[in-house]
Amino acid sequence: MILYIRENFDVSNVIIVSPDAGGAKRATSMADRLGVEFAIFHKERKKANEVSRMVLVGNVKDKIAILVDDMADTCGTICLAGDHLAEAGAERVFAIVTHGILSGNALKTIQESRLEQLIVTNTISQKENKIKCPKLEVINVAPTLGEVVRRSHYGESVSKLFHEVPY
């Protein structure tokens, strides 16, 4: 994902955003590796699985805001966060997630949101979803997984992949 961001965005204008407190460590790690700022949403809930309010902590004005999460299922939270980022003055809004589960009305939610793109890896096949949703972009993780296998086979460090670009 780091390599994808470096190759596809003007990193000097990027801010990494966590859609919730649970992803703060992931977002700050990615922001540190890219040398950019980060922001986070604080969610207040009325009851389980129902967000009553999202409060943005950080300044996204005139920035390319990239929401980062481990997975996207129904996409309600990530798209709501995207809408809030646009309202807060973000120049462009993207989301990048590792696993695109995309169940229920997720594709419709994405299409109707202010996200410019939802970028997912191909850990779950997205062939049909890509046809239905033009905002969906897929990153191929096969080269990275192949490198993990190669390193394991030759007794080399796999953990280095988590600390070195391009992976």
Image: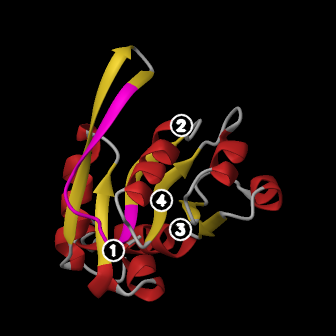
Compared across the picture, whether 108 is left or right of 28 comes to right
Q: Position of residue 148 (x, y in %)?
A: 40, 68
Q: Is residue 86 above or below residue 33?
A: above
Q: Amino acid at mark 2?
A: Gly
65 sits to left or right of 120: left
> For the point 52% across and 47% down, which residue is it?
79
Q: Is disc 4 surrounded by few (<14), some (14 to 19) or many (20+) residues within 10 Å? A: many
Secondary structure at numbered mark 3: loop
Which residue is under mark 3? 141
Q: CA gap, disc 4 to disc 3?
A: 17 Å
The label number, if any, that marks residue 63 in the structure image: 1
Distance in Å between CA atoms under marks 1 and 2: 22 Å
Q: Residue at x 27, y 74 (%)?
A: 156
Q: Which mark is residue 95?
A: 4
Relative height, residue 47 to residue 154 (above, below): above
**What secondary structure is marked by label 1?**
loop
Residue 96 coordinates in the image, percent (x, y): 47, 61
User: Which residue position is annotated with label 2?
Assistant: 76
Q: Is residue 119 magenta?
A: no
Left or right placement of residue 143 versus residue 110 in this view: left
| First along the sequence among labels 4 and 2 | 2
The answer for how far apart the CA atoms under marks 1 and 4 are is 14 Å
Label 4 and label 2: CA atoms lie apart by 12 Å
Q: Earlier in the sequence, mark 1 or mark 2?
A: 1
Say what amino acid the circle numbered 1 marks: Lys
List x then y, in percent, for residue 104: 70, 32
Q: Earlier in the sequence, mark 1 or mark 4?
A: 1
Q: Find out whether the residues at labels 1 and 4 contact each other: C-beta distance under 8 Å.
A: no
Between discs 3 and 2, the one toward the N terminus: 2
Q: Quadrant of residue 163?
A: bottom left
Q: Which residues are magenta?
A: 52-66
